[in-house]
Image (cartoon, rainbow, N blue to C red):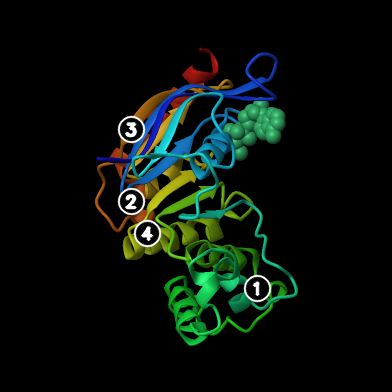
Amino acid sequence: MSFIEIENVDLAYGGAARGTLAVSGANLTIGHGEFVALVGPSGCGKSTLLKLIAGLVRPTAGRVRVGGAEVTAPLKIVGMAFQNPTLLPWRSIRDNIMLPLEIVEPHRRTLKQDRDKNVARVDALLARVGLTGFADKMPWELSGGMQQRAQLCRALIHEPSILLLDEPFAALDTFTREDLWAALQDLWQFRQCTVILVTHELREAVYLAQTVHVMSARPGRLIKQSSVDIDRPRTLATTFDPQFVELVHQLRQAISDGKNL
Ligand code: ADP
Ligand code: MG
């Protein structure tokens, strides 16, 4: 059964009559634990689709369902990370990662008594992304790539069933970004949560996702869906496989065609 269902969704910022139509007639289903990438030209409505799933905006038409229930308010079972690390500069890495626990129930209620358990969870996540020993550092003591790793930990600390990533690696240099692909793949295999990754980097999409969805230029429609049947764990060497290269090429073509629809 589908976990996330987007059914005939339109989203017009500023209202149906005179607003900006950002997403049009979107249909998309995502399975429980699936890793999906969403690609398309700038301004085509990718971030808007994430906001619709998170319940941060309501569709102008159509329906968004998660776990069979219509999304009518911001979902608590979501973790999010964005392009620019948004770690609070006056908090240590550990306290930054714990932030969602101070906000999201049921963790909030048991924050004090669970302190030791939570510290252990932070440490386990940090170890997973190669940041053992950095919990007591301040954000400015970490490189951009390390801050992004910490941000992934923060997005996962409350054990969300959906992880929404909006171009999380876009501001990083190529080498750092490619290291983070491996870290994210590992986190997903470890946690098995549903991941929706928005990216304009097609190699990143094919490296990480089971399914890549292509959106057309605004108003964004979903115009192509590609399954990535490549074994895991995928590595940088995988990106040179003919099958990988061919898929990236096909996606590039689909995006180019989608600009002229
Ligand atoms: P993408 O993430 O694919 O670059 P967005 O989903 O951010 O695209 O935006 C899709 C379209 O909706 C763009 O034309 C953008 O200018 C417009 N848009 C996004 N957010 C708002 C908003 N809060 N108010 C009005 N228009 C918006
Ligand atoms: Mg965006």
250 w.r.t. 83: above or below: above
Residue type indicated by callout 4: Trp
Please name the residue that numbered disc 4 is placed on: 188
Instruction: Tell which of 163 and 128 is nearer to you.
Output: 163
Q: CA distance from mark 2 to mark 4?
A: 18 Å
Q: Are marks 2 and 4 in contact (CB under 8 Å)?
A: no
Sequence-earlier tag: 2 or 4: 4
183 w.r.t. 239: above or below: below
- Tell us which disc is closer to us: 2 or 4: 4
Of the 4 image quadrants, the one containing the N terminus is top left
Please name the residue that numbered disc 2 is placed on: 238
Please name the residue that numbered disc 3 is placed on: 226
Please name the residue that numbered disc 1 is placed on: 142
Residue type indicated by callout 1: Leu
Q: CA distance from mark 4 to mark 1?
A: 23 Å
Residue type indicated by callout 3: Ser
Sequence-earlier tag: 2 or 1: 1
- Tell us which disc is closer to us: 4 or 1: 4
Q: Are marks 1 and 3 in contact (CB under 8 Å)?
A: no
**Label 3 residue SS:** strand
Sequence-earlier tag: 1 or 3: 1
Mark 2 residue crowding within 10 angstroms, few (<14) / some (14–19) / many (20+): some
- Residue 104 place in picture, x, y as percent: 54, 63
Residue at mark 3: C-beta within 8 A of ligand 1: no
Total count of labels: 4
Q: CA distance from mark 2 to mark 3?
A: 17 Å
At 58% across and 42% down in the image, what residue appears? 56
Q: CA distance from mark 4 to mark 3?
A: 20 Å
